Amino acid sequence: EVHLVQSGAEVKKAGESLTISCKGSGYSFTNYWIGWGRQMPGKGLEWMVIMWPMNFQVIYSPSFEGQVTVSADNSISTAYLHWASLKASDTGMYYCARARDGDFWFDPWGQGTLVTVSS
Amino acid sequence: QSALTQPASVSGSPGQSVTISCTGTSSDVGGYYFVSWYQQHPGKAPKLLIYDVFNRPSGVSNRFSASKSGNTASLTISGLQADDAADYYCNSYKRGGTYVFGSGTKVSVL
């Protein structure tokens, strides 16, 4: 069975750095895109970025370019979302999801990682 | 980038049908047959309901149907059930290779 398992909740201060992870299992990790989305408290989903682990091609949503970076360690089937300097407005739930190359939908989704940033 | 436009809420009685619209532009919804729909129950991760405008993944009830006309996609839930109470989001591939979500619609079952 295919699963995406994300790292646990984080509580950080503004200005700190953070990396959260998304580990895939039950499929060939490098043959699927990994996307990341944000959901701020009480708000809707926002698309952030998508990455092709095979060659590390990355496409950022304009709203998030320069705000986060993504990477992957294919040897452990894990994708990462990184902030160099957190802001209070980064507080939210972050989800990863996968898409097969040539498909334009995402399934399944990880369980989400709650990031809380205090000012 | 702006979210696709969805009604904030829709409601219906058990057994009734409700339809959720999702309006974008020619750069996203209108330009591609790559619209998907997701259901999100409170505190849960999104779940894929529809892909490529009108296709249902295996395991998704045929009470969920969808279509697209021009820059507007639509999701219809027939035979409304209590468990259908959730938030629903459309998503579209965009010119440039990224994606955009709709603003989200809360479905209430009266």
Image (cartoon, rainbow, N blue to C red):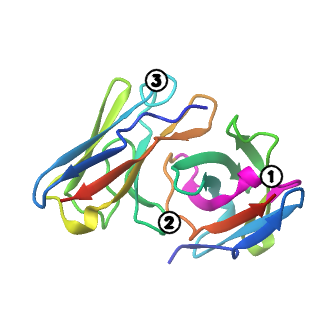
Residue A73 visible in rendering: no
Q: Mark 3 lies on which chain?
A: B
Q: Mark 2 lies on which chain?
A: B
Position in image of residue A57 (x %, y %): 76, 46
- Give the residue type that dot 2 points to: Ala
Quadrant holding the C terminus of chain B: bottom left
Q: Name the residue under label 1.
A: A87
Residue B65 visible in rendering: yes
Distance of mark 3 from mark 1, alpha carbons?
32 Å
Residue drawn 64% across the image and 59% down it: A92
Position in image of residue B32 (x %, y %): 45, 30
Can you tell which mark lies on residue A13? none
The quadrant where residue B67 appears:
top left
Q: Name the residue under label 3.
A: B25
Viewer-nearest residue: B23 or A60 = B23
- Give the residue type that dot 1 points to: Lys
Look at the numbered disc 1 and give the secondary structure of its residue: loop
Residue drawn 39% across the image and 43% down it: B52
- Give the residue type that dot 3 points to: Thr
Viewer-nearest residue: B23 or B34 = B23
Residue B59 sits above or below residue A64 on the image: below
In the rendered image, residue A91 lying in the magenta stretch gets the answer yes
Look at the numbered disc 2 and give the secondary structure of its residue: loop
- How crowded pointer 2 is (Cα within 10 Å; few <14, some 14-19, many 20+) is rated as many
In the rendered image, residue B32 lying in the magenta stretch gets the answer no
Please state the extent of the stretch shown in magenta in the rendering: A82-102
Can you tell which mark lies on residue B45? 2
- How crowded pointer 3 is (Cα within 10 Å; few <14, some 14-19, many 20+) is rated as few
Residue drawn 62% across the image and 35% down it: B97
Q: Are marks 3 and 2 on the same chain?
A: yes
Q: Is residue B30 left or right of residue A101?
A: left
Q: Do labels 2 and 1 share a chain?
A: no
